[in-house]
Amino acid sequence: MARYTGPVCKLCRREGEKLFLKGARCFTAKCSFEKRSYAPGQHGATRRAKLSEYGIQLREKQKVKRIYGVLEAQFRNYYKKASRQKGITGENLLQLLESRLDNVIYRLGFAPSRKAARQLVLHRHFMVNGQVVNIPSYTVTPGDKITVREKSRKLGIIHEALKRTSDETLVPWLRVDKAKMEGEFLEKPARQDIPIEVQENLIVELYSK
């Protein structure tokens, strides 16, 4: 499975903002972005070129790709699928990305980051509707129940992640029962309920050229 394996803090620096790719570390003084918020590279601290219209659209696409941890070919497939659906293409795209199993597990609070959620899924620690699923890109649909496997319920990474979550941080389209270590995907999220600051219309404009 192809995936980005380089230093993730460089991705935040390249986009010029925190993408919260390393979970709890991003909220501490150890966060690399806090120390070096300029772009990576030899001249990153002294030079940041003014972006063209195309450059702005490209950076927005790259930001969304990096937030959800998908590569170009997969992201383009999501866009094509979103463009064929009824409704607003940009919102459809975000809905598809939010419906990925690794993202849902992260949103439920079972993992400190999407990257960690992806690893937990690959190692078969979760079930969907009673069946083990080890595909991070698996699309969760309304009514699906996600459960931590019985043998995985003592994992420290899951317990630590749950401690840092609260009712205030849970999105309204998910339900979680911490005691039972299970959650439910209630409905497809509305745009206003997806807590990421991106301009998805710029991505649509980019791919429409």
Image: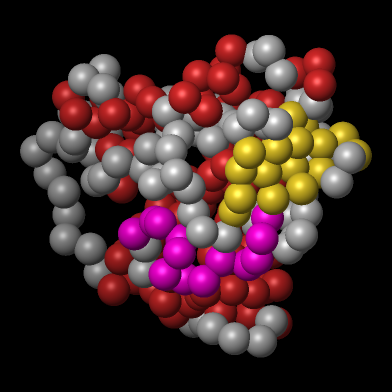
Vertical side of 83 occupied by 25: above or below = above
Residue 73 shows in this picture: no
Residue 190 position, x and y percent, is: 52, 71
Q: Quadrant of residue 132?
A: top right
Residue 179 position, x and y percent, is: 64, 29
Vertical side of 197 occupied by 137: above or below = above
* Magenta segment main secondary structure: loop
Check if residue 194 falls in the magenta segment. yes
Check if residue 70 falls in the magenta segment. no
Q: Residue furthest bottom?
A: 86
Q: Residue at x 76, y 59 (%)?
A: 143
- Residue range highlighted in magenta: 185-197
Residue 59 position, x and y percent, is: 36, 58
Q: Residue at x 63, y 67 (%)?
A: 188
Vertical side of 142 occupied by 168: above or below = above
**38 on left or right of 62:** left
**150 on left or right of 77:** right
Front one among 149 and 50: 149
Vertical side of 25 occupied by 137: above or below = below
